[in-house]
Image (cartoon, rainbow, N blue to C red):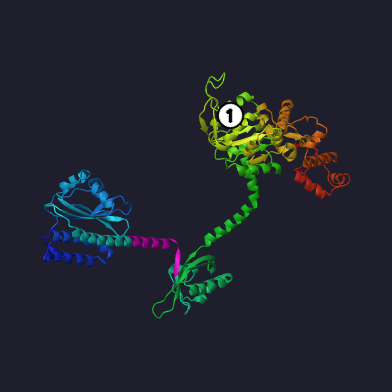
Amino acid sequence: MPFDEMAIRSSTADLGAEGSDRLRFETLLADLIARFVNIPADAVDQEIAAAQRAICACLGLEHSSFWQVSPDDPTLAELTHLHRDQALPPMPPLVAQETFPWARAKTFAKEIVCVPDIAALPPEAARDQAMWQQLGIASVLVLPLAVGGGPLLGALSFEAARASRPWPKALQDRLLLLAQVFAGALDRKRADQKLRESEARLTLAAESANAGLWTLDPHTGQIWATSKALELYGWSPGEALDVARFFARVHPDDRDHVRQVIEQAMRSGHDVSVDYRILHPTGTRWIAARGRRQPGRAGEPDRLMGISSDITDAKCIEQELAALRERLQAESAYLQDEIVRGQFEEMVGQSPALQAVFQRIAQVAPTDTPVLIQGETGTGKELVARAIHRLSRRKDRVLVKVDCAALPASLIESELFGREKGAYTGALTKQMGRFEVAHGSTLFLDEIGELPLELQAKLLRVVQDGQFERLGSPKTFRVDVRLIAATNRDLGQRMQEGAFRQDLYYRLNVFPITVPPLRDRPEDVPLLTWAFVRELERKMGKRITTIPQQTMEALQRHVWPGNVRELRNLVEQALIVTSGSQLTVRIPGRPGGPATAALSSLKGVEHRHILAVLEQTGGRIKGPGGAAERLGMKPSTVYSTMQRLGISLRRRKDDIST
């Protein structure tokens, strides 16, 4: 019950008073602390208000405020309890951060605010002083509320209105002790509220989960179950349940496993779980059960208590996902190939040699490692560089290209590194070099083998340190550039000739990529041919539907010294002279001599030889006079070799259709 204020009212001004007044205050304080020891959560607010009135009455104070920090926003404080003498003016609405900013800052720092006389406040407390004067307050003591080193829970203040008064250290300590008791009670109240909210949410969740509770006495075998559990297992309300009836419901294939789990739970005392099937009257169902051994009351045996839920729908989905996973795994290799082809859409082909290039591109693209692309003229080195840039983190910036073979030696330096106005005769304006343009992006140096020796040292410095100077300027520039170089020259031989710096070569050749010549991937010729046909026919207003089989085979047998570029030119020439829907290609004469033969790989020779034999036999493989007999091979070996080389197994003399 609240305190008897009349019994404790006193004119005691401070704890320094002697005799009965001091004894009365100490007795009051002890009584208050005792009341808050085991106070119920729903009585905290009532007792705090009563304690404020009692302290003010005992110490002759006219005002006491109790502020609480919001649990949702720790920067806000709300006035929740107020004791104010009726003789004082009415209280206006108060907001701590607006009306008492100086005192609020100190309280949030967990400092005691002691103001014996508000007239003596420092200038920074002017706003607080004006509000206290408006409220008729002459002296203030504000105590922070916190439990141990925990967060601030609020503040408790006591104010005198009639006159200023001192707040002795002994009194502050006593009132601070009371504030800490208030803080503990407030903390317990909040914890109790959270617990009740948690219990309410848990109850709602259990009901929403469609789960049933049960208890098993392993000594008697008796089972208690809620109505929901009875429904899950297909039992009737009021039906006597025991272990035997339970296992009669469990699927025969799962009974041993369920029995082992129950025995494990009783031995260990830990949480156990098991999924099993039951023979429900409506059909086979899946049940998920969780349980733990619970100690019985004095003299009673332990029991197994748990919860069960129907997971039949989830199991069906799980089985469907397992089937889908198996199907996806079977298609994994195909999907990976499709992804690779999609990433390198400008580079047409699916030969093993080109796939190896795709793999190298994918490996190096995410890094900033320098790349050296090597290959014969016309193999598509620039396409490789573009693919690397497109898959890199620099893809949002433009790829900058410099053809080192297309510029005279006198202009390459200014093209790469820039120049200042007047750097040399004719330099009428300042020019930014390609390295500056490519800052944050990728610079592609094509035909790097043609770079003059005197510029290679300057290029080496950029590769090593990212630094260079413009022509005519002593200022050093720093850039972030990813470098890709390409060449059709043998840089090893160029180093031996003294035309290429060895240190630069090893700086550029960190990750080499060699683009295979077209003669080493004849299986890509049909794909490339049709790709060029589709690209060029739109420009020429024509439509090609067929290419003669003999023409395609002749294209595959050709050595292609000009590689892909030569094939494209040949298709363009054929489209110009073709008037119908069938493409007629005039294959150029094959260069003869040992030099040409040396350019052919063993695979290319094998591919052309088999095509020639198939042409002689009219595409027939088996039987007398067939390709297998002429090649001295088994028909099965011929078929597997054709498949390996990318030669169509369906040989026809008519045309190849689109």
Task: Give the image location of residue 245, x and y in percent.
Answer: 51, 75
Task: Give the image location of residue 319, x and y in percent.
Answer: 58, 59
- Residue 551 within the magenta-colored segment of the rendering: no
Task: Give the image location of residue 656, x and y in percent.
Answer: 75, 37
- The residue carrying pointer 1 sits among few (fewer than 14), some (14 to 19) or many (20 or more) residues within 10 Å by Cα, namely many
Residue 95 visible: no
Which residue is located at x 54 percent, y 73 percent? 260
Task: Give the image location of residue 231, x and y in percent.
Answer: 47, 68
Residue nearest the observer in this picture, 151 or 38: 151
Q: Quadrant of the C terminus?
A: top right
The quarter holding residue 98 reads top left
Residue range corresponding to the magenta coloring = 193-213
Which residue is located at x 65 percent, y 45 percent? 337
Q: Quadrant of the N terminus?
A: bottom left
* In the displayed structure image, the side of residue 341 where residue 292 appears, left or right: left
Looking at the image, residue 124 lies above or below residue 147: above
Residue nearest the observer in this picture, 154 or 461: 461
Describe the element under mark 1 as helix, strand or loop: helix
The kind of residue on which mark 1 rests is Leu
Residue 115 visible: yes
* In the displayed structure image, the side of residue 194 where residue 135 appears, left or right: left
Looking at the image, residue 406 lies above or below residue 643: above
The quarter holding residue 353 reads top right
- Residue 197 within the magenta-colored segment of the rendering: yes
Report the number of discs: 1
* In the displayed structure image, the side of residue 646 where residue 35 appears, left or right: left
* Magenta stretch: helix, strand or loop mostly: helix
Residue pointed to by mark 1: 416
